[in-house]
Amino acid sequence: MHYKDIIKPEYIDQYKEQHRIFYSTLSSLIFDISFLEACVELQDSELCSDWITVKFLHRNVFENLISKTYRCFFDNSGRDSITLFGYKNNVIGKFSKEEHRQAVINQVNAVPFGCDDFVSRKNALEQNLLAIRRSFVAHRLLITEDEAVVDLREIKLLAEYGYNLFQALSFEAADFYSLGEGDGYDFSKEISFT
């Protein structure tokens, strides 16, 4: 079904705005994860002759990934902040029309977790991301590995679940990303840094 059939008319703009936020964020997470995996795969190859540069790129992307992952899934601290789970709750509880609410709930509940112990792994990842974000990324303090460890595979598992959840909440939403609709991403309006 189309989002205009499922979402209450008074919430379509808010639905679209929040949808765009998570489309952009999840796309960025997936790109960063792919980049980091490529760094690890290539670190010993001849294609990676300037490993010191790749090492710094890897570190910067990983730090950025930690911040983005925490913000996307766990950060409810700001007045205007919203997590993917908050977006899910909005779509189910506030945005969707009553006659479609149960279908939306069923669609969300059908999203696979990817593993049996997903909830406990998600909770552990949240605590580790928060510790690293507070102690290391935000303040550039040195922490030891036993204080907080984040495995890229754990972030990838959460991002894959997030992507599948996002897909379940999309309802044929691609039409409001086209420039013809006036709501698409216009690259000509990007800020130039030159």
Image: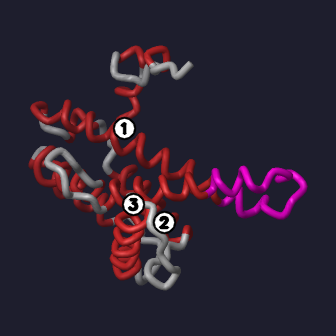
Q: CA distance from mark 1 to mark 3?
A: 42 Å
Q: Secondary structure at mark 2?
A: helix
Instruction: Where is residue 3? Give x, y as percent.
Output: 27, 37
Quadrant of residue 55 within the rendered picture:
bottom right
Q: Earlier in the sequence, mark 1 or mark 3?
A: 3
Q: Residues within 10 Å of mark 3 (few under 14, many from 20)?
A: few
Q: Is 67 above or below relative to 152?
A: above
Marking on residue 66: none
Q: Position of residue 45 (x, y in %)?
A: 86, 59
Labels 1 & 2 near each other (Cβ < 8 A): no
In the image, the segment drawn in magenta is: 37-58
The mark nearer the N terminus, 2 or 3, is 3
> 94 or 125: nearer the eye?
125
Please indicate whether residue 10 sits to the left or right of residue 16 in the image. left
In the rendered structure, the answer to whether residue 17 lies left or right of residue 181 reads left
Could you classify mark 1 by the number of other residues whose Cα lies within 10 Å: few (under 14), some (14-19), or many (20 or more)?
A: few
Mark carried by residue 139? 3
Give the SS element for disc 3.
Answer: loop
According to the image, label 2 marks what residue?
155
The quadrant of the rendering that contains the C terminus is top right
Comes first in the chain, label 1 or label 2 = 2
Amino acid type, callout 1 = Glu
